Amino acid sequence: MSTPPPVTLRPLTEEEFAEWSRRAAESFAAGMGPSRGLDPATALEVAWQETAKLLPDGRDTESQLIWMACDEDEPIGSLWISTQRTNPYIYSIEVNEGRRGKGYGRSIMLAGEEECRRRGYAYLDLTSSAPTAPRSACTTHWVTSSRPSRCARRCSPRDVCRLWYL
């Protein structure tokens, strides 16, 4: 696999957070609604409620790290990691539609991994449930990579994967 494009992470602005929140709720509703037997409108309402519980202070909620991922100064995606538990947990990773399939998902995950390492964490958890090929390929590569992390066990869709750093 080729070297992924460089990505930096920065906090979201208030305006970016408002747009990110809308996309996050819609994405959460689309995945959670059918599994709970909810119609789309109800699923979106539940998604907003559950997201509000996780982020009571918006982008400034303690133990919630929400970043804009940038290639130089251009936003190309986002990453949300919660540090409420013993191990940080990836709630979401997003690559802007025009940038998908170019290695940015992997770059964002690696930047998030490095940020967790910098903060003193030894593990990083995520749930892999993405049905799309580019996202699945990104996740599979990340959790099975021997550099800079290794997966604690073989992961399959909908598993929680625990990573440790070398």
Image (spheres, grey):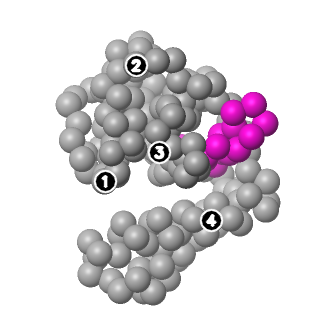
Q: Earlier in the sequence, mark 3 or mark 1?
A: 3
Question: Which of the two marks, 2 or 3, is nearer to us in this view?
Answer: 2
Structural distance between the alpha carbons of marks 3 and 4: 16 Å
Residue occupying the point 50% across, 70% down:
26
Q: Which residue is mark 2?
A: 1
Please state the extent of the stretch shown in magenta in the rendering: 65-84
Residue occupying the point 49% across, 51% down:
92
Q: Which residue is mark 4?
A: 21
The local secondary structure at tag 4 comes to helix
Q: Is residue 94 above or below residue 18?
A: above
The local secondary structure at tag 1 comes to loop
> Quadrant of the rendered structure where residue 37 is?
bottom left
> Residue pushed farthest front?
98
Question: Which of the two marks, 2 or 1, is nearer to us in this view?
Answer: 2
| Three-letter code for the amino acid on which mark 3 is drawn | Ile
* Disc 3 and disc 1 in contact, CB within 8 angstroms: no
Q: Which residue is mark 3?
A: 90
Using a 10 Å C-alpha cutoff, classify the residue at mark 4 as few (fewer than 14 neighbours), some (14 to 19) or many (20 or more): some
Residue 155 visible in the shown view: yes
Q: Earlier in the sequence, mark 4 or mark 1?
A: 4
Q: Which residue is mark 1?
A: 131
| Three-letter code for the amino acid on which mark 4 is drawn | Ser
Q: Which corner quadrant holds the C terminus?
A: top left
Structural distance between the alpha carbons of marks 2 and 3: 23 Å
| Three-letter code for the amino acid on which mark 1 is drawn | Pro
List x then y, in percent, for residue 151.
30, 26
Q: Is residue 50 above or below residue 62?
A: below
